[in-house]
């Protein structure tokens, strides 16, 4: 039985918190029914159906007869605006932990993505940084919050839905640089299949980022652990540090640690 999130007064989930719980559950299982959620949360099926309808209108889930399912398959990835709404509390905690690893005078790469953007928002008190990114959003945010930073944008093909720069030009630029730390987002991370990505071109750019860094730090909420996407990026051993949230499968985390990866749980 899934763990009930204790939010709100007296352990009762408020509307927004219920819907976050539902998204977390669908992220883990792929689909849910209104009956099972209502039973677990001790709330009427009518209320849960309204929650599912609201999530479906935002295209965060796909409604099915009696329930809902994930909108994401192995060959797909979420649009950037949808990603920003999923697991936002977890991503903020992960990003804050990531920012603590940034030191004065560091040269860092922050990969495009929702957790990368949150990381950028948390490093504004750091001094004398050089930041390379393939994200238009991250470059824009940092140019406003810290105009004293040296900011380098990779160039490349603009991927409109994620505001990222990918492709041969981006890869060529990244291959010519060396960074102290690279903060990368993860679409899928599996013990056997390694790190995977939904987009083939993006997978190559991610590989170039990993190879450019002395230390690779993966920012990965629990829904991506154990998930396999279509394009191979790198084996797990390429990761030095994994930062994830407290909902992550503890057995899987122990096995990742056995590979020599430092695991930080927030």
Image: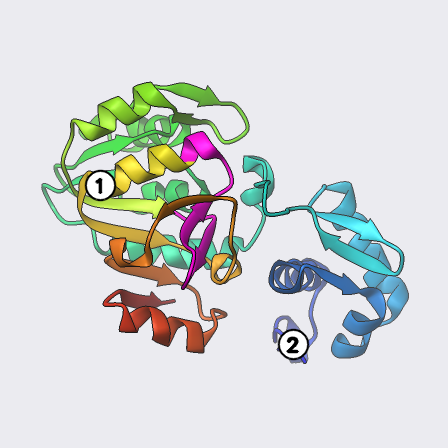
Position of residue 62 relative to residue 254, above or below, is: above
Say how the picture is coloured.
rainbow
First in sequence: mark 2 vs mark 1: 2
Residue that numbered label 1 is attached to:
211
- The quadrant of the image that shows the N terminus is bottom right
Residue 110 in sight in this render: no
Q: Please state the horizontal and vertical placement of residue 258, each as a whole percent of the image.
A: 28, 73
Q: Please state the horizontal and vertical placement of residue 36, each as a whole percent of the image.
A: 80, 73
How dense is the environment of label 2, judged by Cα within 10 Å: few (below 14), some, or many (20 and up)?
Answer: few
Quadrant in the rendering for residue 11: bottom right
Contact flag, marks 2 and 1 (Cβ < 8 Å): no
Residue 104 in sight in this render: yes
Residue 101 within the magenta-colored segment of the rendering: no
Q: Which mark is residue 57?
A: none
Disc 2 element? loop
Q: Left or right: 16 with respect to 91?
A: right
How dense is the environment of label 1, judged by Cα within 10 Å: few (below 14), some, or many (20 and up)?
Answer: some
Position of residue 152 relative to residue 192, above or below, is: above
Disc 1 element? helix
Q: Please state the horizontal and vertical placement of residue 58, each as a whole percent of the image.
A: 72, 41
Residue drawn where x is 43% and y is 56% of the image: 193
Q: Please state the horizontal and vertical placement of residue 88, each as a whole percent of the image.
A: 52, 53
Q: Residue furthest front?
A: 192
Q: Bounds of the magenta span?
A: 185-202
């Amino acid at each position: 039985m899934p763990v009930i999130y204790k939010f709100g007064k007296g352990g009762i989930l408020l509307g927004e918190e219920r819907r976050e719980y539902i998204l977390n559950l669908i992220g883990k299982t792929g689909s849910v029914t209104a009956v099972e959620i209502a039973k677990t949360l001790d709330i009427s099926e009518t209320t849960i159906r309204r929650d599912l309808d609201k999530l479906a209108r935002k295209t965060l889930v796909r409604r099915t007869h009696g329930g809902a399912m994930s909108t994401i398959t192995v060959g797909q990835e979420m649009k950037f605006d949808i990603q920003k709404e999923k697991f936002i509390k977890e991503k903020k905690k992960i990003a804050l932990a990531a920012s603590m690893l940034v030191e004065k005078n560091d040269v860092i790469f922050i990969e495009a993505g929702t957790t990368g953007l949150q990381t950028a928002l948390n490093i504004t008190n750091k001094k004398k940084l050089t930041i390379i990114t393939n994200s238009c959003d991250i470059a824009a945010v940092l140019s406003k919050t810290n105009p004293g930073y040296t900011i380098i944008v990779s160039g490349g093909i603009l991927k409109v839905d994620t505001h990222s720069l990918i492709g041969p030009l981006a890869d060529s630029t990244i291959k010519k640089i060396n960074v102290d730390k690279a903060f990368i987002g993860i679409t899928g991370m599996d013990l056997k299949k390694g790190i995977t990505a939904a987009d083939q071109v993006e997978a190559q750019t991610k590989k170039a980022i990993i190879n450019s860094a002395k230390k690779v730090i993966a920012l990965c909420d629990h829904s991506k652990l154990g998930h396999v996407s279509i394009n191979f990026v790198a084996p797990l051993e390429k990761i030095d540090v994994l930062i994830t949230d407290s909902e992550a499968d503890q057995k899987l985390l122990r096995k990742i640690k056995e590979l020599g990866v430092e695991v930080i749980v927030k």
